[in-house]
Each structure stands twice: as C-alpha cells, then as structure tokens.
Image (tube, rainbow, N blue to C red):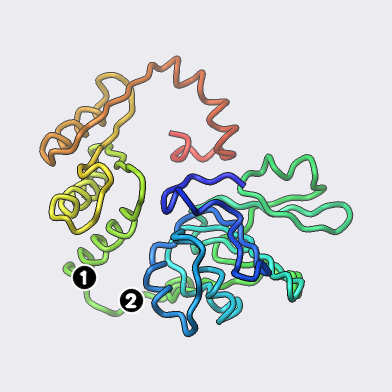
Amino acid sequence: HERLAIIDPESGEQPLTSNDNTIVLSVNGEIYNHKELRGELKSSYDFKTDSDCEVIIPLYQEYGVEFINKLRGMFSFVLYDKKNERYIAVRDHIGITPMYMGFGADGSVMFSSELKGLIDVCSEYKSFPPGHYYDSKNGNLNKWYEPEWADGRVPAEKLDLSSVRAAFEQAVQRRMMADVPWGVLLSGGLDSSLVASIAKRKTDRGEMSSVLNEVHSFSIGLEGSPDLIAAKKVADFLGTKHHNYTFTVNQGIDALEEVIYHLETYDVTTIR
C-alpha cells in the first residue's frame, strides 16, 4: 500500500494495526474529525501513530460497523478483523476518493483504489458505490449514508447566510489539517477565491498551524487565459505566494491519453 502522507508522515505507514494485531486497516483519505473522535472513545486506547486514520480501529472495536456514520472526511478503506474472520470495505459519503470492487472466478472479492489493480485478476469489476459498505459477514453492499435531502425533501428552514458562512469556513478549516506543506488551487473564480481567502485569513491569524506559515496558491492554464489573469489578481489582493503554470494547446492534447489513463474517467470537468 502506498499513501500520500498528509498527517503523521513519519509513523503513519500502512497497513495500520490494532494493539494486538488482530485488526488490520488499509485506508486512503483523511478523517477530518479524528481528534474529536479520539476524545469520545469510551475506553482508553494506546495509539501507535498520530495518523488521522488510526482512530478507525478503536471505533470499530467499540461500535462495529455503526461507527462509519461518525466519520467526517474523504475516505475509502478495507478493515480486516482476524478474530471474527470478517472484513468490511467502506467508501465515503459522496465518493470523493476512488474505490473499485472486483470478483475473482473463484468467488473471491477484491478492492482497489485503481481499476488497473483489478483488471488482470478479476473476471468482473465495478465502481464501489459512494456512501456504502461491504460486509463479508453477509456478502452484501449496505447503504450507510442516508441524508434527509436524498429522498427529495425540500427544506422548510429560512435561509440563514451567517450559518452558511460559518459552515463554509469550518469546512475549509477542516481541510487545512496537515503535517506537510500545502497550497490552494486558484482559478480566480468565486469558489476558489473564497476558499483561498478563508485559508489565508485563518493562517495569518494563527488559527491553523502551517508548515510554511504562509499560503501558497497555484494556477494552471493556457498563456494569457482569463482564469490565469483573474487568479493573479486574487492572489495579489490576498497576499498569497502565487505560482503560475502554463501549457500550450498541443501539450494539452498530447497529455490527454495519459491523464485519462491515470484518472480512469472521461468526465470533462475532472480531466480539465
């Protein structure tokens, strides 16, 4: 298992295991509320690492599969329980992190964050549905994320802009959690400009620690494109350390095949 180490790059190597080594966990993603979850554990637990994902193990020990609803973040993982000869595979609420499920000719079930890892060993494979978990105990895919809006319910509450702002700022702050340098992708549009603004303000105020103590912003596009011009204006206004990258039309066309191969999607927005 290879991971992009964001939290605890020194000791958070995977797979993660329980203290008695009977639970093994391989996970891709981030658990934004891991500190709160550690504090809410009913029993004391001797953590081996500072990884945000290790909290999944004691949560499973205390709550079984019901713990999944407590997680806030983006994640896909497989947890193996040796004592009970059981494993579960889980994908986050809306499928931010990729996950695929494959079936071998011998009836085996496999999981991978890349479809390429299953093609040569599985006779059948498919995308693992977001907001679901697979339980080897019954061999079923079960839906764990069932928000109220999923059934078409129209909210009756009046619009509260202060609540929207608070929720948005909290969402950005959660994603600033890192033990390594990080930056923001800035297009100059409304969404990315607001995210960059919040990240810069919270960093300047010392509300969130940053390895570099400054916010780096990044933009990429065709030379002279409106997005790059707008992004530079926003970066100058906010005072971020801005990095601008350009490519030609031919370079973009030449990269398409490789980009699609690695992303494993034809989705225009994702590829662009």
C-alpha distance separating marks 2 and 1: 15 Å
Residue at x-position 51% and y-position 58%: 75
Circle 1 SS class: helix
Tags 2 and 1 touching, CB below 8 Å: no
Left or right: residue 228 compared with residue 162: right
Q: Pick the residue in front: 120 or 86.
A: 86
- Write down the quadrant of residue 142 in the picture: bottom right
Q: Pick the residue in front: 20 or 38.
A: 20
Rendered location of residue 38, percent (x, y): 42, 73
**In the rendered picture of this protein, how many numbered marks are placed on residues?**
2
Q: Which residue is mark 1?
A: 163
Rendered location of residue 2, percent (x, y): 58, 44
Residue at x-position 18% and y-position 38%: 240
> Quadrant location of the C terminus?
top left
Q: Is residue 45 visible?
A: yes
Q: Which residue is mark 2?
A: 155
Residue at x-position 25% and y-position 53%: 209
Left or right: residue 51 compared with residue 110: left
Tell me the tag on residue 147: none
Residue extending furthest toward the left: 237
Residue type for callout 1: Ser
Mark 1 nearby-residue class (10 Å; few <14, some 14–19, many ≥20): few
Residue extending furthest toward the bottom: 42
Above or below residue 220? Residue 216 is: below
Mark 2 nearby-residue class (10 Å; few <14, some 14–19, many ≥20): few
Left or right: residue 266 compared with residue 156: right
Rendered location of residue 189, percent (x, y): 24, 41
Residue type for callout 2: Pro
